[in-house]
Image: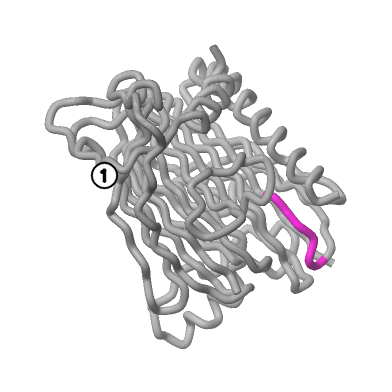
Amino acid sequence: MHWASIFRLSIALVACFVTSTAMAEDFEIVVKVTAGEKPVQTKQTRISELRKKLGAKKKKQPPRLIVKSKAGQSLTVDWTATNTADADTLTGLLVHFFVVKIDKAGQEKVPKLDKDVVHEGILSLEFKPKEKASGQFGLTIRKPGSYLVRVETIGTLISHGHEHFAAIDILVE
Amino acid sequence: MRDSFEDFSMLRFITLLAIAVMFSGVSSARAEHAVITMEVIGPDGRALAKSDEEPPIGGSLPRSKVTAKAGDPLVLQFILTNVYPHGVLKDVKVRYFIVKIDKVGQKALPPIDAKKGSDEEKEVRGKIVTRGHVTMNFKPKCRIGMRLMFHIDEPGVYLVRLDTNNTKADHEHIAGIDLEVK
């Protein structure tokens, strides 16, 4: 199967899952958004699990941190993804990160990434125990509104029963 | 118009992923280190860049050029595939940026980094449209894909560039496109 097909399939699968509020212990994602001199950072790596596996109704998410910025202001996003497990090597893992416009800050539904995507990246790699990858990118958003900054794993659902993500909202005024 | 432009960009991104897979297979046989496919897409056209090496400064291949109008919505997307088959290259930084340059085809890079708070910092910042990087251990067949939207208001010539750093080889891999904003 082509990598592109796997990519599309993985994105579609992740989009179908319900997010639980559990915190991950086997993988850590840190996201920091800086607008001006004040960075906002979250280390709350959450996990997404199958609704059927949970056998429960959709749980409400704790609120995401919000960064306020002005239209046209320069923003910087930093992220780090670390396999915190002691023994498990994650093979064929994708680390996917994006900034996309959402209807309102805090909305739980992750929109399809087919429009209003400001920035999107994906890495395909193998994570040995304690190994990490990191990145930084700058962006300038001109269109006022709410935006979701999200860093997530794709590829641990089968092996771990869940995926991992961390997210922050940007409110552009 | 804008939505269809973005849909088109997404399709191009997926297509690039597929192209990268094909290229990685071909290049492995030639023992290359990295294969890059980079594209800048605008409403009036697009330009494609492939892997080059540095030194020499700015690479040896001529850069392709794309023209846009000030304020146009533009998309940069790239796929980099590590096809170095002989082990892990630790802490490789893949850097991408868009910076104003003096003329089309200019090989020398303008300053990209400056000490925070210095006089030079303001000047450097003023020339950079956007920038980003990823740091990771390069293992055989690992890949990086990126897609980002940007606008440029100030007419001029800009370099869209991707490069690797810290591969501990006698060369680094680069790709570049000239963007002329009118």
Relative to B68, does residue B19 appear above or below in the rendering?
Answer: above
Mark 1 = which residue?
A28
Which residue is pictured at 51% across the width and 52% down the height?
A107
> Extreme front residue here?
A57
Main SS type for the magenta part?
loop
What's the residue type where badge 1 is placed?
Answer: Glu
Residue A121 position, x and y percent, is: 52, 43
Does residue B86 show up? no
> In the rendered view, does A147 fall on the left or right side of B133?
right
Pick the residue in front: B31 or B49. Answer: B49
Residue A157 position, x and y percent, is: 36, 24
Which residue is pictured at 25% across the width and 43% down the height?
A23
Which residue is pictured at 65% across the width and 35% down the height?
B13
Does residue B21 show up? yes
Residue B84 position, x and y percent, is: 41, 27
Q: Secondary structure at mark 1?
A: strand
Relative to A105, does residue B83 appear above or below in the rendering?
Answer: above
> Extreme top residue here?
A1
Specify the color scheme. one colour
Which residue is pictured at 32% across the width and 50% down the height?
A80
* Quarter of the rendering containing residue B169: top left
The quarter of the picture where the N terminus of chain A appears is top right
For residue B96: magenta? no
Relative to B85, does residue B101 appear above or below in the rendering?
Answer: below
Please report the bounds of the magenta region as a residue range: B70-75
How packed mark 1 is, by other alpha carbons closer than 10 Å (few <14, some 14-19, many 20 or more), is many
Q: Chain of mark 1?
A: A
